[in-house]
Amino acid sequence: SELNETEIQSILEDMITTHKAKCCTGKVADYIPELGKANENQLGISICTVQGQLIEAGDVDSPITLQSISKVITLALALMDQGEQKVFEKIGMEPTGDPFNSIVKLETISPNKPLNPMINAGAIAVTSLIKGADVEEKLERILSFIRKLSGNSKITYNKKMARSEEETANLNRALAFFMKEHGVIEGEVDHILELYFKHCAIEGCCKDLARIGAVLANNGKDLQTGETIIPLHIARICKTFMVTCGMYNASGEFAIRVGIPAKSGVSGGILAALPFKLGLGVIGPALDERGNSIAGVALLEEMSQRWNFSIF
Ligand code: GLN
């Protein structure tokens, strides 16, 4: 049923006020210097129903870079490009329990393939599977896919952010070269990384996140036209990974406390998809120690309790 917009909005505004206080207990990520410039007091939420109704509260206007949230989108595209068999030959399906940028299991688990596509190693391997003649064409394909998902034709990437990451990405470089050595990725490592940094730097607002979430919630179908943007079985794979691995090594706790398929990024964004109902976009750059938006997670937890959002 249609939500009573004004009522819900005022509830959301109250929740934002409550949880905003938690921003100061978190920390903006600064291992990518350009990310360190984010406003640590920002907290905003957008809800988009599968019917396309949009409700927003808080600081929703300044965009963030998608960072790890882009991993869901590139996974969908790689699965559409290459099929399940090829993708999961290279990348596993299991959560790691380690931080997103960890290298340890790449070496200790045979056969050296990344455990899942939501951690950096797995996502870099996914990036290597995107089709296109060169980096530019591949990036253009990712961008037009995201523009379609969000219904926002203006979406682009932040050049400064991509450069800032490129200049400091020693760990991601190590992951990529390790995988190249072991045949997990093929092709020019520098080109794969360039594409990875650029898709991580794609910018969106709260409502873009919510709209993409709503398409996933809507089984991959466009909210207005019903056109299939992501095939059902691929949308399902994406949402399942969001549950098992989407919040890094806090995915289990998030599943219990919130219970909505979600993907976070170090920029402080969270994209969530409540199947058949809603997409949610949260922006709150102050992070907890596992790299998730500290106030954003608290906000989602309260919303989930209040409206019984858990899928479990
Ligand atoms: N671009 C970031 C990185 O590779 C994304 C990480 C994240 O959002 N957790 O480090």
Image (cartoon, helix red, strand yellow):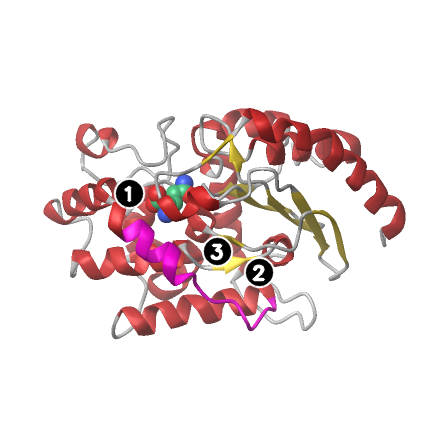
Label 2 or label 1, whichever comes before in sequence order? 1
| Residue highlighted by disc 3 | 234
Neighbor class of circle 3 (other Cα within 10 Å; few <14, some 14-19, many 20+) is many
Q: Position of residue 28 (x, y in %)?
A: 48, 36
Q: Quadrant of residue 248?
A: top left
Q: Residue at x 58, y 57 (%)?
A: 212
Look at the image and say whether residue 94 sits in the magenta stretch: no
| Residue highlighted by disc 2 | 220
The answer to whether marks 2 and 1 mark residues whose Cβ atoms lie closer than 8 Å is: no
Residue 159 in view (yes/no): yes
Q: Residue at x 80, y 35 (%)?
A: 14
Question: Circle 2 — which element?
Answer: loop
Look at label 2 and name its amino acid.
Gly
* Residue stretch rendered in magenta on the structure: 151-166
Label 3 or label 2, whichever comes before in sequence order? 2
Query: Along the horizontal axis of the image, is 184 left or right of 137?
Result: left
Query: Along the horizontal axis of the image, is 38 left or right of 188?
Result: right
Look at label 1 and name its amino acid.
Ala
Q: Position of residue 135 (x, y in %)?
A: 28, 68
